Amino acid sequence: MRDHLLALTAIQQHLALEAYEKAAAVAKNRLGISALNSHNTLYMARFMPTATQQIDTQMHKATIRFVTIVQEDGLGGSTNKIIAKSLAGVVQQCAAYHSSYRVHP
């Protein structure tokens, strides 16, 4: 989870510099579906309630949408509003996840 925060920070830094391809690569590699193995997600999932697992899946899907928007539109002059809204969708899933699943009460 900490790496997710670091990845979100890196994505925002790349977007601020209009380095869209780098932002998309960080999102894809560290937050996308391909990141599941690197974060030991299958092991951790067995400790999570089903609803929390679904939120986690939605975060990865939101990341795929973000990557697609940045790759297809970011370089072609997409508005920052569209990119920001898409990234907010990823962060929204993170917030929902951490609001619903806690190791400590």
Image (tube, rainbow, N blue to C red):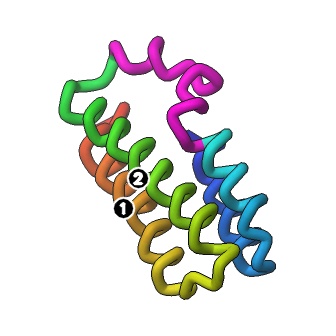
Report the Cα–Cα distance between label 1 and label 2: 9 Å
- The residue tagged with tag 2: helix, strand or loop? helix
Residue 14, picture quadrant = bottom right
- Judging depth in this view, the residue of 101 and 36 nearest the camera is 36
Where is residue 60 shown, x and y percent of the image? 44, 42
Q: Contact (CB < 8 A) between labels 1 and 2?
A: yes
Can see residue 6?
no
- Residue 48 is covered by the magenta coloring: no
Q: Which residue is at a point 62% across and 45% down the rendered structure image?
A: 28
**Mark closest to the chain's N terminus, 1 or 2:** 2
Q: Residue at x 66, y 56 (%)?
A: 24
- Mark 1, secondary structure of its residue: helix
Residue 7 on image: x %, y %: 67, 52
* In-image side of 75 versus 2 (left or right): right
Q: Residues within 10 Å of mark 2 (few under 14, many from 20)?
A: many
Quadrant housing the C terminus: top left
Numbered label tally: 2
* Residue occupied by mark 1: 92
Question: Is 83 placed left or right of 96 in the picture?
Answer: right
Three-letter amino acid code at disc 1? Gln
Q: Nearer the viewer, residue 19 or 75?
A: 75
Q: Amino acid at mark 2?
A: Ala
Query: Percent from the top left, x then y, of residue 102?
Result: 33, 38
* Residue stretch rendered in magenta on the structure: 31-46
Residue at image mark 2:
62
Classify 90 as above or below 14: above
Q: What x and y, as percent, mark residue 69?
A: 52, 65
Q: Residue at x 35, y 36 (%)?
A: 57
User: Residue 37: which numbered mark, if any?
Assistant: none
